[in-house]
Amino acid sequence: MAHSIEELELKAVQIREDIITMLEHAGSGHSAGTLGLADVFTALYFDILKHDPKNPDWEERDLLLLSNGHCAPVRYAAMARAGYFNVSELKTLRQLGSRLQGHPERTKLPGMETTSGPLGCGLSQAAGMALAMRMNDIHHRWIYVVMGDGELDEGNIWEAAMLTAKYNLNNVIGIIDRNNIQIDGPTEAVMPLDDLKAKWVSFGWHVIEIDGNNIESVIDACAMARAVVDKPVMIIAHTIPGKGVDFMEYDFHWHGSPPNAEQAKKALQELRTLQGKIRSEHE
Amino acid sequence: MNNLNLVKDVLSKEIAKEPIRKGFGRGLLNAGKINTNVVAACADLTESTQMSLFKAEFPERFVEVGVAEQNLVTVGAGLAAMGKIPFVSSYAAFSPGRNWEQIRTTVCLNDQPVKIVGSHAGVSVGPDGATHQMLEDIALMRVLPNMVVIAPCDSLEAERATLAIAQDQRPAYIRLAREATPIVTSQKTPFEIGKAYIYKEGTDLTIISTGTMTYQALAAAEKLKKDGINAEVVHVPTIKPLDEKTIIKSAKKTRKVITVEEGQVIGGLGGAIAELLSEKQPTKIIRMGMQDRFGESGKPEQLLEHFGLTAKHIVLQAHHITM
């Protein structure tokens, strides 16, 4: 492991700060899911993924698909901090001519494996990639797919779930951001998903449930997932929407909203003092 | 006309016929032999779409996705992301009928060379009725940036078109028909993506046709000869990108245009030609095809007659426009 868990936790805080700054500057975007996924993306880019930020098209790399494309800012921030591009570029989010589109586009930013935003399309593209790898006799390259939980309302997901299990595409590792909110409200009110674990098990998947805001759990779960060879693996990562910013946590109204200047200042203050636990060097 | 090596007597009762989809099946098999990266996926219609030839020869390069057209095209996008040239097939009513947004985002905007094969297009599907007679596919695919749209006129052209799109790096849609269609081209007839071909030269009017209707257009032109009308027939197998030069030149010469297609004229070939000519070469135009309505059950030949899509109907319109 290149980084200790403590170092990774500080990276996650840094990524959350980036997210707040980006969204405030852009004046639009999705706060809740993006902040909630900061720990998952820190774990992926700084520990789990085999990748080379200086050579995004490296042929041996693991693939990471962001199916819930509206959470692009967390990926952009993680990529910038990992060295794919300069951190200063984060401020161009959602602006004319930027490589950092509101929803991610493969053809604009190297390292982005797919164009996404319209929901439900990531898992099936991962399955296609895995099928192609099998045809080419390529093993030991992993395809991680991050999905939202609200996204599971889409039929395309379940079509892909059946196909991935049918062909036992065990180098596909799904990660569901189970934060229990979507735009119109709590997931269980909009369209009940539970028993979510039982659903995936019945579709032929091996399921691991974790605390998705615990970086060590994310790393361990992915290691376990890679060891399962008889089934594809779905990691249900329970996260707190808006994690790290007290006034955003658990509130579905932050799904599709950015902080204004005052809220951003308050959020940054809170992140930099680790919710009041330490004195911030920024003060 | 001779250098295109077309059939000599289009009005002959002995003219050979074959379903256009059969030519696709052979073309895909050949494409698979030429390039090991050519792969195929189907949504439970392997025999109907004639992907069965490829599946039998290359089972390890074939994916059966079941009755799931959204998955069909997105799995295709994933295959393409890894360097494959995926052909994904179903009935046109379902793909691109049902999965348009997936095609838009994961194929066109994502710029992956997925080849969408829509079989059983047009009213000539017959007794299955309106649900299965896809008429809007050309409009749906033509409006998408990056997409190539092809409607071959017979099985031999379908074979060549399939090979051509397999060697092309762009997303593509190829439209196939179910019924046996008269074969008007030969192995030596040229096909190039983006080219329209003057299948018969004439001076009095231009009949612009695509897909199954090119045979009807050629038959109409032969019949019109006896009436002293010299019609030019322009076959447009590639509806996008449109061969503007050839079409404008012909319209400029004859100053009267009839478009014919087995689909909705709104947004279809008729729409494309009207857009082009109104902007660059305003020309008197009659658009034949489905006029903003659905099909219905019946025998294929009955339906073509019922909806006015035969050589006889083209002749009538030709008289009308040259009056």
Image: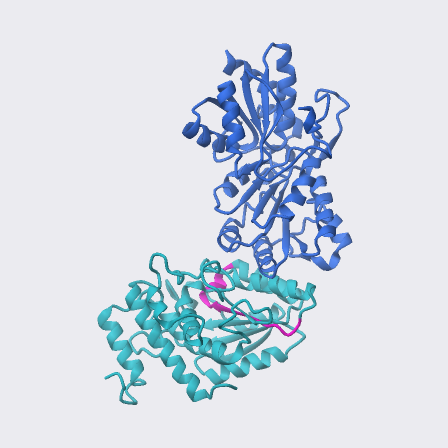
Chain colours: A cyan, B blue
* Image quadrant where one finds the N terminus of chain B: top right
Q: Where are the magenta residues, as a range?
A: A139-154
Q: Quadrant of residue A59?
A: bottom right
Q: Is residue B222 left or right of residue A237?
A: right
Where is residue B34 drawn, in percent x and y? 72, 51
Where is residue A139 drawn, in percent x and y? 66, 72
> Residue at horizontal 41%, vertical 67%?
A71
Q: Is residue A111 visible?
A: yes
Q: Is residue A269 magenta?
A: no
> Residue at horizontal 71%, vertical 36%?
B156
Q: Is residue A243 visible?
A: no
Q: Is residue A144 magenta?
A: yes
Q: In this picture, is B30 found above or below B232? A: below
Q: Is residue B253 left or right of residue B119?
A: left
Q: Is residue A84 left or right of residue B49?
A: left
Where is residue B150 drawn, in percent x and y? 59, 39
Front in this rendered view, residue B243 or B9: B243
Q: Quadrant of residue B159?
A: top right
Q: In this picture, is A96 found above or below A31? A: above
Q: In this picture, is B109 found above or below B229? A: below
Where is residue B28 drawn, in percent x and y? 70, 47
> Residue at horizontal 41%, vertical 30%?
B279
